[in-house]
Amino acid sequence: MEHFRASNGTVEMELESMRPWRFIIILCVSACVHEAPQEAQIPFASQASPLIVEPTESGILEIELEASQLENSPNRLLKYGFNQMSPGPVLLAPVGTELRATLVNQLEMPTTLHWHGAGAPNTMDGTPRVQDPVLPGETFQYEFTLSNPGTFWYHPHFDTARQVDLGLYGMVIVYEPSEPQPDERLVLVFDSAAENQPREMIDDHRHIDGHGMHWLINGSTKDTFEVSSGAVVRAHLLNASNAGYLHLNSEGMRVIAHDQGYQGTVHDGPLVLGPGDRAEVEWLPGADPILVDHRPFSLNGGVTYMPEETLFSLVPLGDAPAASPSAMPVSTPEYKDYWTTKSADFTYVFHGDSRTNSWMLNGESFPDVTPFRTNVGREVIIEVRNLSSTNHPFHTHGHPFKVVSRNGNPVDPRNLHDTIDVAIFETMRLVVNTYNPGEWMVHCHILPHAYAGMMTYMIVE
Ligand code: C2O
Ligand code: CU
């Protein structure tokens, strides 16, 4: 219990700046006036506002997401997007909103949408286990209630490594209106352009390592964001990279939430975000710019020898003094000793080898796997043991989990995750409350690892 330390995650940023977003925002403002959102508009920081879509007064968020090739690709790595944007539109909604998203497939290949972290029911989970891929020219309507707060994302779950790498992803923000709200929100979606990798690796869309990487923020190389001085700024970070890790820090950075919204605990940076991971960070700009540093981080062993560099900065408009931190209600951790002492209900052991690119869970490679079966309404203890020589961002579909111990030592169990970085030779215990029946994928979110076999599924019945 004394080792409480919030766990890490990974984030990538998206910037709208070199894209048609500004233009689209204006268009939307005039086109959508008759559908004023129900909640008071939460202002987005001025230069970080991609297209934001909110629910109408009826509490329904309806959107058509057209997957297609980008007509004006800003760089050679992002080739596809939703509604001609990569990242796609940000969906912003209070808890309880009904989401109706129609996927329109204008690609030349089949695709699906997975709602990473958002707690969709099994039939809406977008994996080939639960739905037929949506063929070119076809549509599919995803419909479910956004019942948990958090920073989530949507991305294809078919030919995933390639389709995500080519730019098919977007953020979903679900907020709890009864909590203190920020003055401004900032969306930062990070993706890595592995320009230092051999050409074949780039063309193959399987970027392998985290160092020497160049990061795009919101699809762009623009790295300054305007915020208002004196504002409480909440940044939603997503690492949409296939394989790159982020290690971020800045003065006064407060990590308010990991993947699954605020859970009664706040901690200071640094923040590690592996592929697929998200976090919510609070910054309190005064008159001076806030520089956010990145330490090059390798999945082969953490922070590398290379110097820390500024990845992006927040430039305040105005010279008001910094606001005080938002008064988030703090909860008391409740720890059950049997979480660390009892034997685990199921164990996932990670094996693999970067040289042969073979990656396995429990010695099995997807699709030849033995699923873990359990029942609805149980509290399940899962142990993950990384016996391989790289980190792995472990991701479970359908159910979030608490991390209750690392290497046998209890840790603060308050945060909820659906994606967690498991370091080399680390053993971690996770507690999952099964409420969502179905067949759920469980995999490493380094997409080339998942693609090579580090993927299985769990059956909740
Ligand atoms: Cu974001 Cu199964 O993935
Ligand atoms: Cu992995």
Image (spheres, rainbow, N blue to C red):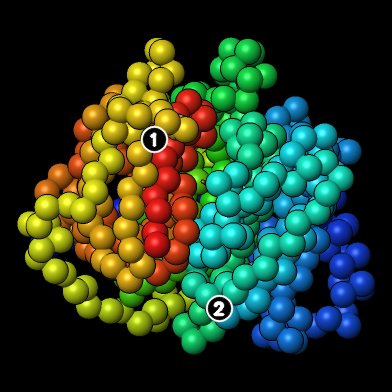
Q: Residue at x 24, y 44 (%)?
A: 347
In the rendered image, residue 352, in percent from the top left (x then y), is placed at: 34, 23
Residue at mark 1: 369
In which quadrant is the C terminus drawn?
bottom left
| Residue 424 in the image: above or below residue 24 | above
The amino acid type, in three-letter code, at marker 1 is: Val
Residue at mark 2: 95
* Residue 183 seen from this side: no
In the rendered view, does 453 fall on the left or right side of 109?
left
> Which quadrant would residue 76 be assigned to in this image?
top right
In the rendered image, residue 171, in percent from the top left (x then y), is placed at: 62, 57
In which quadrant is the N terminus drawn?
bottom left
In the rendered image, residue 278, in percent from the top left (x then y), is placed at: 48, 54
In the rendered image, residue 383, in percent from the top left (x then y), is placed at: 23, 47
Packing grade of label 1 (10 A; few <14, some 14-19, many >=20) is some
Give yes or no for contact between labels 2 and 1 (Cβ–Cβ under 8 Å).
no
| Residue 181 in the image: above or below residue 424 | below
> Which quadrant would residue 51 be assigned to in this image?
bottom right
* Residue 427 seen from this side: yes
In the rendered view, does 380 fall on the left or right side of 273?
left
Q: Residue at x 26, y 66 (%)?
A: 379
Q: Residue at x 69, y 83 (%)?
A: 59
The kind of secondary structure element at disc 2 is loop
Q: Residue at x 19, y 49 (%)?
A: 406
Q: What numbered label is drawn on residue 224?
A: none
Packing grade of label 2 (10 A; few <14, some 14-19, many >=20) is some
The kind of secondary structure element at disc 1 is loop
Structural distance between the alpha carbons of marks 2 and 1: 36 Å
Mark 2 or mark 1, which has the lower sequence index? 2
The amino acid type, in three-letter code, at marker 2 is: Val
Q: Nearer the viewer, residue 194 or 421?
A: 421
